[in-house]
Image (cartoon, rainbow, N blue to C red):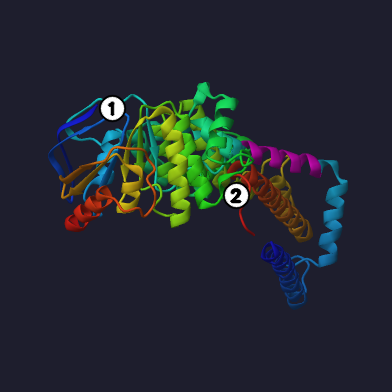
């Protein structure tokens, strides 16, 4: 369990969180939703250890994977090189090839990022996150710049990988449909506070556009928070 | 691709036009002045170039100047790389260095050459002057390349706890190199220019500057023009060679599809 206990965070423009508390269940995908500037990415960056804060955050594993909105691949390394980089001395050609196969990038191992489409580059980013032996996967709107069809495919790719180890994941989005498809728990944030805490059991990914009370609840909470 | 080759052809055409324009200006000056002691004829200059090429002493002087130039540039580059590394490790050192670099940048070359001539020898003074000229430039360029490295990539490296050696060899060096190679040709060419100027002032024996100084003593304008043209060509060749090297390394360093355009 990851626990945030009375966490406060301020920027020069003003406070984002004040005495914020939250528990994140292990082995589940938790989604953070809310309007721009509500503190979703700030929360993710505090969990990643990228931002200083006041208060206590406990239970964050020593190794954390992060899937960014933009791929953040090194232009001088191939697809294989980018994935192997995060493994350092642990790099194993078989493991890298295997994970690239799972994200449907077989045959693209020796391609450079400039030769990939946006969707392929994001697959490399997902492969890198899963190749890294982390206990927590953070995702900051990783599907935001993709079209719907590609988004659905990539959510499928992510879920296939996630299903193998069921690592704890925290996922930021502003899209209710993405949250519905990919999360077990959805937290809607407004001005640094949780205004809705919704849960749904069952398998992920859920079917795109399917009628569901969970989806309706996320949409309704998001609409009232923005 | 088509635009790249068209751009390349345009570059060659404009370079050719620039050479023709300079040659035209020379001919106009020659026929206006009609005095070989002030503006030499094109033929006399070509003959002087030929004589130089046939003379072992010229090649020894040319080699000496070129070696000193490369040495000065290499030491300046190594020093700027070292100071950049120290600056990256300590912001205090970077702040301490900033006024020193500014001071070096505005140092009057002539005055420094004259002082160094008193303190050192005519062979050493031009090397030190060239170093002092090129070091602040090289450091500033390296620092700009360092600052241009995408902070988001460095953040990714921090999150994934990428080791120091991998960060250096797979992130910092490859991402710094294109900027470094792009400036190297021009920097060496500038070092050569400063070196020859300092050699002329110092009257360095066995150097191109020394030959220029001797030619000026005997009012041999054709020889001065010949040496100037040779050094111009040498500088141009160095810039061209490093330009080509930079294109190759761009592909190597940045991966396919990322090479610099024309």
Q: Are marks 2 and 1 in contact (CB under 8 Å)?
A: no
Q: Residues within 10 Å of mark 2 (few under 14, many from 20)?
A: some
Query: Looking at the rendering, which quadrant does residue B218 occupy?
Result: bottom right
Q: Which residues are magenta?
A: B58-71
Residue A94 to residue A9: above or below: above
Residue lying at 71% horizontally and 48% vertically, measured from the top left? B241
Decide if residue B257 is on the left or right side of residue B101. Answer: right
Q: Mainly helix, strand or loop, the magenta region?
A: helix
Q: Output the chain of dot 2.
A: A
Q: Position of residue A212 (x, y in %)?
A: 29, 50
| Mark 1 element type | loop
Q: CA distance from mark 2 to mark 1?
A: 36 Å
Q: How many marks?
A: 2
Q: Output the chain of dot 1.
A: A
**Image quadrant occupied by the C terminus of chain A:** bottom left
Decide if residue A61 is on the left or right side of residue A79. Answer: left
For disc 1, the marked residue is A60
For marks 2 and 1, the one nearer the N-term is: 1
Q: Position of residue B114 (x, y in %)?
A: 54, 44
Q: Residues within 10 Å of mark 1 (few under 14, many from 20)?
A: some
For disc 2, the marked residue is A115
Q: Position of residue A121 (x, y in %)?
A: 51, 46
Q: Is residue A100 magenta?
A: no
Query: Looking at the rendering, which quadrant does residue A60 occupy?
Result: top left
Residue lying at 66% horizontally and 49% vertically, measured from the top left? B247
Q: Position of residue B109 (x, y in %)?
A: 52, 48
User: Could one spot residue B257 in this view of the protein?
Assistant: yes
């Amino acid at each position: 369990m990851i626990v945030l206990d009375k966490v406060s965070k301020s920027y020069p423009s003003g406070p984002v969180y004040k005495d914020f508390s939250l528990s994140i269940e292990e082995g589940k995908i938790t989604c953070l939703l809310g309007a721009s500037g509500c503190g979703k990415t700030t929360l993710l960056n505090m969990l990643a250890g990228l931002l200083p804060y006041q208060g206590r955050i406990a239970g964050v594993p020593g190794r954390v994977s992060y899937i960014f909105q933009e791929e953040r691949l090194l232009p001088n390394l191939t697809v294989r090189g980018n994935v192997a980089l995060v493994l350092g001395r642990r790099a194993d050609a078989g493991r890298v090839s295997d994970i690239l196969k799972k994200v449907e990038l077989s045959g693209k191992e020796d391609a450079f990022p400039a030769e990939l489409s946006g969707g392929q580059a994001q697959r490399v980013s997902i492969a890198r996150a899963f190749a890294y032996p982390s206990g927590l996967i953070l995702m900051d709107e990783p599907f935001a710049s993709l079209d719907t069809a590609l988004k659905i495919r990539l959510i499928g790719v992510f879920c296939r990988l996630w299903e193998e180890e069921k690592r704890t994941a925290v996922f930021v989005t502003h899209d209710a449909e993405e949250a519905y498809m990919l999360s077990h728990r959805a937290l809607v944030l407004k001005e640094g506070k949780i205004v809705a805490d919704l849960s749904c059991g069952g398998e992920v990914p859920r079917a795109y556009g399917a009628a569901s009370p969970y989806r309706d609840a996320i949409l309704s909470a998001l609409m009232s928070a923005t | 691709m088509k635009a790249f080759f068209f751009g390349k052809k345009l570059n060659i055409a404009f370079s050719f036009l620039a050479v023709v324009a300079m040659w035209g200006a020379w001919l106009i000056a020659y026929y206006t002045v009609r005095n070989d002691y002030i503006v030499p004829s094109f033929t006399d200059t070509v003959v002087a170039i030929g004589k130089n090429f046939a003379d072992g002493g010229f090649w020894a002087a040319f080699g000496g100047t070129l070696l000193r130039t490369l040495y000065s540039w290499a030491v300046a580059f190594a020093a700027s790389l070292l100071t950049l590394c120290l600056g990256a490790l300590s912001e205090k050192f970077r702040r301490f260095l900033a006024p020193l670099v500014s001071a070096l940048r505005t140092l009057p070359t002539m005055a420094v050459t004259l002082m160094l001539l008193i303190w050192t020898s005519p062979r050493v003074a031009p090397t030190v002057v060239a170093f002092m000229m090129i070091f602040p430039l090289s450091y500033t360029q390296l620092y700009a390349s360092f600052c241009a490295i995408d902070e988001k990539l460095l953040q990714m490296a921090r999150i994934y706890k990428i080791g120091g050696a991998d960060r250096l060899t797979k992130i910092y060096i490859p991402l710094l190199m294109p900027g470094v190679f792009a400036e190297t040709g021009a920097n060496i060419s500038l070092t050569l220019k400063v070196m020859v100027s300092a050699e002329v002032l110092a009257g360095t024996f066995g150097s191109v500057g020394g030959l220029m100084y001797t030619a000026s003593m005997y009012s041999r304008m054709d020889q001065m023009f010949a040496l100037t043209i040779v050094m111009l060509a040498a500088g141009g060749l160095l810039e061209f060679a490093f330009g080509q090297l930079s294109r190759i390394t761009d592909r190597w360093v940045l991966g396919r599809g990322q090479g610099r355009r024309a």
